[in-house]
Image (cartoon, rainbow, N blue to C red):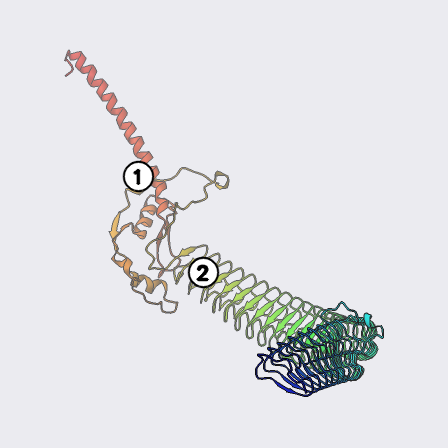
Amino acid sequence: MNSLYSNTTGNINTANGSYALYSNTTGSYNTANGFQALFYNTFGGSNTATGLNSLYFNTTGSQNTANGERALYSNTTGNYNTANGDRALYSNTTGNNNTANGFRALNSNTSGIENTVNGYVSLYSNTTGSSNTANGSYALYSNKANSRSTAIGYNSMYYADDRTTGHETFNTSVGYEALRGSTTASNNTGQYNTAIGDQALYSNTAGVRNTANGVSALYSNTTGNDNTANGLQSLYSNTTGYNNIANGSYVLFSNTTGYSNTANGNQALYSNTTGSDNTANGMNSLFSNTTGYSNTANGNQALYSNTTGSSNTANGMNSLYSNTTGSDNTANGERALYSNTTGIENTANGFQSLYSNTTGNSNTANGSYALYSNTTGSYNTANGFQSLFYNTSGNSNTANGFQALFSNTTGYNNIANGFQSLYSNTWGVRNTANGFHSLFTNTSGNNNTANGNQALYSNTTGSSNTANGVSALSSNTTGYLNTANGSNALSSNTEGFHNTANGNQALYSNTTGSGNTANGFHSLYSNTTGVYNTGIGLVAYPDNGTLTNYTCIGYYSGGASSTSNMVEIGNTSVGWIGGQVEWSTYSDSRIKENVSENIPGLAFINKLRPVSYNLNIHKQNQMMYAGKDQQEEWDSKYDLEEVRMTGFIAQEVEQAAQEVNYDFSGVEKPEEGNCLYSLRYSEFVVPLVKAVQEQQIIIENQKGEINQLKSELQEIRSYLGLQNK
């Protein structure tokens, strides 16, 4: 009766029931089922109302759906709302995009938008709050103006903040009385909380960013923030503690104000009250901890006995089991650091590593039985099976590799890297060995460094040696202060000292020679007992292995003509040696003795025979390098043979000097007959100067004689009365 009574131009409307769509004039696409459904609608469109007085006051609101007696009863201009249930969204007037399912769900809502409600009187008190989700009887019952809350479960968030000035909460609660809150609803201001489980976060008021999953998880929390609890009664006693994570039944059960703890496993960190920054993973891990902080325990009964010790890390069953007050320890592996009580700053990784340690500090052990016997030794590092196994009180040692520093007991400041490196060392100190069997035999030698397979292998008491390369200084026993870099460098050295060899097989044959320096492959290769020699360059060495104070520089420099106290630069193919300025020679009067002026001049110079010539480099190489490996070939190797040179013959210069009884230092005579003569051309300046001086005297004398003759001639002419012409 009287349905669609006032309709004038409205189209495609459906009205079933007395006075349904009674006032509609131009509204279209509406459906009204029930007495006075959509009664006041005038030009609102696309609405659906089913039930007594549903959408009763709607005038211009569109695309609303109301199912149930007086559902969306007060709506006037609100759009896109859905209400299912007696008086659902009853008070809504202008609110949009709301969905309410259940008796009086969203009953008090007026202008709140985008709310979703399922359940008996859920979100009952909401007026202006928006974007809330409530599923379950009495869920979010007290909420009035807060937005973006999600409550699922009976009484879930029941006492939500009831103040009329709201804010976005971002709270989520799932479960019976989850996030129930204080009975004084205005105190419940917490945000960003998630509670899943029966009475999870039950007491929370102002705490923010908490997550609770499990029956009574975070039950007592009031104002604590940023906690995560997963498991039966996990973090049960927490009130104001923050940044805690608990996973497992009764985990962090006793915690009240402790913060930044993480516990995973049955009764992990069970006794903790105020301790902070702890992490426990495994049943009964950190079980006894009360106030200790910054501990990490992973494994069954890891750090079980710890009470106040701090900053410990234990990974593995019974790791750091006995620790009580020791701090800053790390144990990884079953029974690692098992006996430790008060030792601090230890790290053990591996089965029973650092097992016997009690009070030793700052040790690191990686590998089964590493540092096993250590009791009071400190600052040691052992990586590898049984590395530093017998160490008891030695300090500051580092061992990396199977049985590295195995025998060490009291030696300190040693570093061993490699299989059985520094194996025999007992009390040697400050040694470094890197490589298989490096410094293997060393017992009491100190300050040695060996890098490479069997480097310094035979060393026993030699000290301050450095060997880098396979078998470098491998034969050394008591030699000291040697440096060898390169495979087999100084390989034969036994007692020689102060030697430096850089390059493969540099100073290879040296046994007892000392103070030698060799840089380059095979440099000073033949030296055996020679001292204070220097060889720089590929295959730079003389044939003689016993020279003293000899230096050769350049590829293939040195040879049969080399002698002690000599410097050779370059090989026989070098065509130019020089620089920006000329070579200087020390010539200070303070260092010259027995000075005399017995230098022959013209007598010596007149005997010299200047010649031009070509060098036979092929023959020179045969003579000089007979004892060396065959020299490499290159395009310009013999170019110097084509150069026409000028100079003297050394043997002729020697003979000329002997003839005038002149001990001339410009001739270098070889010690052996098959070696080459050489000349120092700069030495010729001295007799040349002397010769010029002698010539000048002759010239001055001749000049005087000429003047005398001219004077006498003038007198004769005057006497004869002759005129000058």
CA distance separating discs 2 and 1? 42 Å
Residue 425: name its quadrant.
bottom right
Residue under pointer 1: 602
Check disc 2 and give the amino acid type: Ile
Judged left or right of residue 172, residue 601 is: left
Which quadrant: the N terminus?
bottom right
Circle 1 SS class: helix
Query: Where is residue 293 drawn, in percent x and y?
Result: 78, 71
Give the residue displayed 47% in from the left and 69% down from the top. Answer: 504
> N-terminal of the two: label 2 or label 1?
2
The mark tally for this picture is 2
Q: Residues within 10 Å of mark 2 (few under 14, many from 20)?
A: many
Query: Where is residue 280 drawn, in percent x and y?
Result: 75, 78
Query: Where is residue 134 drawn, in percent x and y?
Result: 73, 80
Give the residue displayed 20% in from the left and 16% down from the top. Answer: 714
Check the image and report above or below for 6 versus 642: below
Judged left or right of residue 12, residue 71 is: right
- Residue 275: which numbered mark, if any? none
Query: Where is residue 532 drawn, in percent x and y?
Result: 51, 58
Give the residue displayed 46% in from the left and 44% down from the top. Answer: 586
Circle 2 SS class: strand
Kindly tell me whether residue 248 is visible in this rendering: no
Work out whether residue 482 or residue 605 is closer to the camera in this orientation and state it.
482
Work out whether residue 584 or residue 320 is closer to the camera in this orientation and state it.
320
Residue under pointer 2: 536
Kindly tell me whether residue 469 is visible in this rendering: yes
Tag 2–tag 1 contact (CB < 8 Å):
no
Check disc 1 and give the amino acid type: Leu
Give the residue displayed 23% in from the left and 18% down from the top. Answer: 711
Q: Residues within 10 Å of mark 1 (few under 14, many from 20)?
A: some
